[in-house]
């Protein structure tokens, strides 16, 4: 350890690391294995990375002075993303500032998974006659006589003569699309596995599959560690292009997480990773390019052109995946700049183009993708919906982790459902939707989205609820969900929070309206609305309709949850080459609607920000 390094201890976890003076608190915490919330990508504007200096020198900067009062600064409060550590220090990280590992991550799907098992990888045990003077056919031709036409690369050809002779010309041939990638001693035909991954902006989900039977062996989920470098795709695009090391940092972060998940799944299933021959990945366009280490900068500029559109098959080793040395990785085709492989995977898994009548698929996650199918035609668009639902721009917002209010019911007073059954420290997306719907029903929020002060609310409102409305000296109104105490702040919703929710719901409503108009349909024409995605499957339909996130005109029976359709699609592509062909067809057939350039979008968006009438 260098004499110049200083020690930093993070409480209440008791983890210590040694860093150089001038290291940002955010970076030191990451070295200690703790990810601090940075929805703004470390720009010092969201205020979600609050920490308190218990001892040591960490002078405040301009961003700290904007975020905290003079008393709070004296008490040691700082922004982790902006504050440098100048001496040995003890730093307290509040629970609400941590990006915890106990998030609710959706790993299940509710789609018809009936599909033939015909993967790209197949293993065949063969016993061949050894060559003689009368039968001196070349080794590769000898294999072709049993397996049909095949090819082999130079690396395998260098090993093949000894592999055959050392094993008496018996063993298991491993093939992918008529390419011989290995010849294994003994009969290993039953040991054939693959891994499917949903690469989300916020969460990662993986599944280990038996490629001979199609059975699921293990599932793993994790937070995408790229969140510490930016919460949304635009902030990550900016990070990738802001420094020479930016792109590598993002790529290494997600590859490292995928490797950890894969190792965990193999251990749980008792599978050696060398028996894993293929991995399939579905993610939005930016996530897939970052996974591959492809510069995403063009995705952040008009006309938002991706690097590739068709599906990719690349050597797994080039991605850094620790599977069979000759294994491959399949990445889904993409539709456009912000409608990527996860959307195609969802369309594949739900058989969207084969459904009867007009069907709408809405994937509500950090980004909102909207897909419409009718009369054999397909449309798709993407909206920036997730920041509010993921807590990025909500004053007391947080993701669905311990301490998050996930359910709100107003029944004379306020009843809260809190993840982990602990005192609330914030509100997640589903709780925010519930709250907004209840405030609308109670007359506390107007249809225009105005949070009313105490003197304007209905006289019939119970006093227990009316007392939760507070107005500060500047005239700003807030609604308190949970009172604070000496260890945590009060959880309250402000007027600005309501506006952020209106922006998110309005964007999705306007996107739906644009697609329906292009298809010549009305909301009432929709036979089914399918809700997919990690966040979407935790919301309540009636409340989502009340605030306009989902079409209010539809009967509940037409709204269905399909779970993690992106992962389901990735699994299908792993198990069937036919599914991959379908994915390519869907991606190329789908009409990509760029909402930002649609002349009607802004008008519809403004109208959609008004909460629907009861």
Image (spheres, helix red, strand yellow):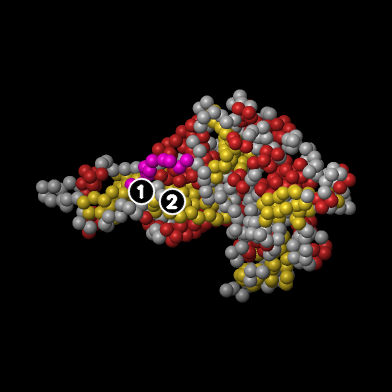
Look at the image and give the residue range highlighted in magenta. 112-122
Q: Nearer the viewer, residue 446 or 138?
A: 446
Say which residue appears at 44% left-offset and 35% top-offset. Answer: 582
In the rendered image, which quarter is residue 223 located in?
bottom right
Residue that carries the numbered disc 1 in the rendered image: 212
Q: Are marks 2 and 1 in contact (CB under 8 Å)?
A: no
> Is 116 included in the stretch rendered in magenta?
yes
Numbered mark located on residue 91 in the image: none
Q: Nearer the viewer, residue 81 or 541?
A: 541
Mark 1 burial class by Cα count in 10 Å: few <14, some 14-19, many 20+: some
Say which residue appears at 60% left-offset and 58% top-offset. Answer: 102
Residue found at the far bottom of this picture? 3
The answer to whether residue 565 is visible is yes
Q: Position of residue 313 (x, y in %)?
A: 43, 44
Numbered mark located on residue 216 in the image: 2
Say which residue appears at 64% left-offset and 53% top-offset. Answer: 400
Mark 2 burial class by Cα count in 10 Å: few <14, some 14-19, many 20+: some
């Amino acid at each position: 350890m260098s004499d110049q390094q200083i020690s930093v201890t993070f409480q209440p976890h008791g983890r210590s690391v040694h860093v150089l003076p001038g290291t940002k608190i955010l970076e030191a915490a990451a070295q200690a294995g703790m990810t601090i919330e940075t929805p703004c990508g470390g720009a010092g504007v969201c205020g979600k990375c609050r920490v308190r200096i218990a001892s040591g020198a960490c002078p405040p900067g301009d961003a700290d002075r904007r975020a905290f009062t003079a008393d709070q600064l004296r008490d040691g409060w700082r922004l982790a993303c902006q504050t440098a550590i100048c001496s040995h220090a003890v730093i307290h990280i509040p629970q609400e500032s941590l990006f915890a590992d106990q998030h609710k991550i959706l790993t299940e799907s509710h789609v018809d998974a009936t599909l033939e098992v015909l993967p790209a990888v197949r293993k065949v045990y063969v016993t061949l006659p050894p060559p003689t003077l009368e039968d001196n056919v070349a080794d590769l031709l000898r294999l072709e006589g049993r397996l049909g036409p095949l090819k082999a690369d130079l690396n395998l050809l260098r090993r093949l003569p000894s592999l055959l002779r050392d094993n008496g010309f018996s063993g298991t041939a491993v093939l992918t699309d008529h390419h011989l990638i290995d010849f294994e001693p003994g009969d290993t035909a039953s040991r054939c596995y693959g891994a499917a991954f949903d690469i989300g902006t916020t969460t990662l989900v993986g599944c280990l599959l038996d490629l001979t039977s199609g059975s699921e062996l293990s599932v793993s989920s994790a937070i995408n560690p790229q969140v510490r470098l930016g919460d949304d795709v635009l902030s990550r695009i900016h990070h990738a292009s802001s420094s020479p090391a930016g792109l590598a940092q993002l790529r290494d972060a997600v590859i490292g997480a995928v490797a950890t998940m894969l190792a965990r799944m193999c251990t749980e299933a008792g599978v050696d990773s060398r028996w894993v021959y293929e991995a399939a990945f579905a993610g939005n366009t930016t996530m897939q390019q970052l996974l591959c280490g492809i510069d995403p900068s063009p995705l952040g500029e008009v006309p938002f052109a991706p690097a590739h559109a068709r599906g990719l098959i690349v050597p797994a080793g080039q991605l850094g995946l620790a599977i069979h040395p000759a294994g491959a990785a399949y990445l889904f085709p993409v539709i456009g700049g912000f409608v990527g492989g996860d959307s195609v995977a969802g369309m594949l898994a739900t058989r969207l183009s084969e459904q009867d009548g007009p069907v709408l698929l809405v994937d509500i996650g950090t980004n909102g993708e909207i897909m419409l199918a009718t009369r054999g035609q397909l449309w798709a668009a993407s909206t920036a919906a997730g920041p509010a639902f993921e807590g990025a721009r909500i004053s007391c917002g947080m993701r669905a982790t311990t301490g998050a209010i996930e359910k709100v019911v107003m029944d004379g007073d306020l009843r809260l459902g809190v993840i982990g059954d602990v005192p609330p420290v914030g509100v997640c997306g589903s709780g925010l939707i519930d709250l907004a719907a209840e405030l609308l029903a109670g007359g506390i929020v107007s249809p225009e989205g105005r949070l009313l002060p105490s003197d304007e609310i209905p006289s019939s409102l119970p006093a227990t609820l009316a007392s939760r409305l507070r107005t500060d000296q500047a005239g700003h109104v807030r609604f308190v969900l949970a009172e604070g105490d000496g260890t945590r702040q009060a959880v309250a919703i402000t007027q600005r929070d309501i506006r952020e929710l209106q922006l998110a719901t309005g964007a999705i409503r306007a996107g739906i309206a644009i697609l329906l108009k292009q298809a010549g349909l009305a909301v009432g024409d929709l036979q089914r609305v399918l809700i997919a995605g990690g966040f979407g499957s935790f919301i309540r339909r009636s409340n989502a309709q009340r605030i306009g996130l989902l079409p209010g005109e539809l009967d509940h029976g037409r709204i269905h949850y399909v779970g993690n359709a992106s992962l389901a699609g990735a699994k299908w592509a792993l198990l069937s080459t036919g599914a991959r062909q379908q994915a390519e067809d869907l991606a190329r057939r789908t009409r990509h609607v760029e909402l930002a350039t649609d002349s009607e979008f802004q008008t519809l968006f403004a109208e959609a920000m008004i909460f629907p009438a009861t």
